[in-house]
Amino acid sequence: MRTKIAIVGNGITAGLAANLLTSLGEITLFQSPRFFTSGIPEIIPRKVFFNALNTIDEEKTVTQTAPAIKNVLWRHSGEFHRTKLTSTEQYFVYDKGRLAAFLVENIPTEQRMQQEITHIADLTGFDRIFDCRGTQSVINDPAYVSHHTYPARTACRYLVMSSPPDQNRDDMLFWSETTIRSSRRTFFMIPVGDNRISLGCSCLPSNVISTEELFTAMAAKGIVIAPEKILFSGHVVPEGRAMTCSINHVTPLGDASSSPCPLSEYGTLKALCQIRAVTGHACFSSSEIQRPKNHEIDPHLPQELF
């Protein structure tokens, strides 16, 4: 009788696990019916990723998961930079939602379940469970304990608002500034889906921009924020956390295991490394998981392309 395995999660980590752990047993993937994925593109080293994930076609993956956004525009230090937001020989640029969906397509429909899993202890009848939910989901789960591992290096205040149909959807814009107190800030305007746009500012955790300051800074660039157009807003201070589950046959993967530093680590590669370890394969070197060192405060900016 084959080992019964449950994989829980909607994101890329769950998709990777479902593709790479099939040799361990009979897999069932549990996905939340209320999942929302940010439309902000991500970037990772191409060769490292596809060498490890040799079960899928590289060119097809690159084509079908490419972000809808075409260009990146960045102004800093009095200079204006523009580059295409596309995969290169060195880097793989993708839309997180599209990549997660593409990976799941390889899994038979009968092995996919639309079910909200709030408490991992409620999932019974499986020999092994791989928890690929987000950090906040596992922190709220009583089966987990978490502890801080390092202080946040960046913070972000943002809002997502509806935008007119004629809004430019091809460009993601960044502009970096230094305040009178020598604090770095990088503002952004990024299309994140049909008739939606994300506006925000990445800054130091010790000097998080206020909502009023964000509105003022956007207005100075000619970007008017109508309160009635705001769909949701918030701020994030991504501190390092490590999570441990009290249930022996549950293995947390990706963000459910530890939250990567968005400025210095490729979270997708870190999760892929954990999955490879489960199957007995060698992990990547630390240098392969690390983003190139730079002085930018915004993790959304694909500096690797400049």
Image (tube, helix red, strand yellow):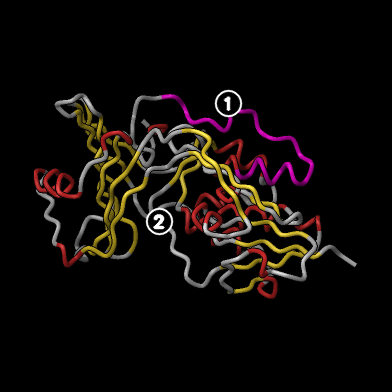
Which percent across, then down, holds residue 167? 20, 59
Q: Secondary structure at mark 2?
A: loop
Q: Is residue 209 left or right of residue 282?
A: left
- Residue at 52% from the left image edge and 43% from the top image edge: 259
- Residue at 46% from the left image edge and 27% from the top image edge: 292
Labels 2 and 1 touching (C-beta < 8 A):
no
Q: Is residue 244 above or below residue 290?
A: below
Q: Which residue is mark 1?
A: 287
Q: Amino acid at mark 1?
A: Ser
Name which of mark 2 and mark 1 comes first in the sequence: 2
Label 1 neighbourhood size at 10 Å, few (<14), some (14-19), many (20+)?
Answer: few
Q: Nearer the viewer, residue 282 or 81?
A: 282
Label 2 neighbourhood size at 10 Å, few (<14), some (14-19), many (20+)?
Answer: few
Q: Amino acid at mark 2?
A: Ser
Q: Is residue 204 left or right of residue 9?
A: left
Q: Secondary structure at mark 1?
A: helix
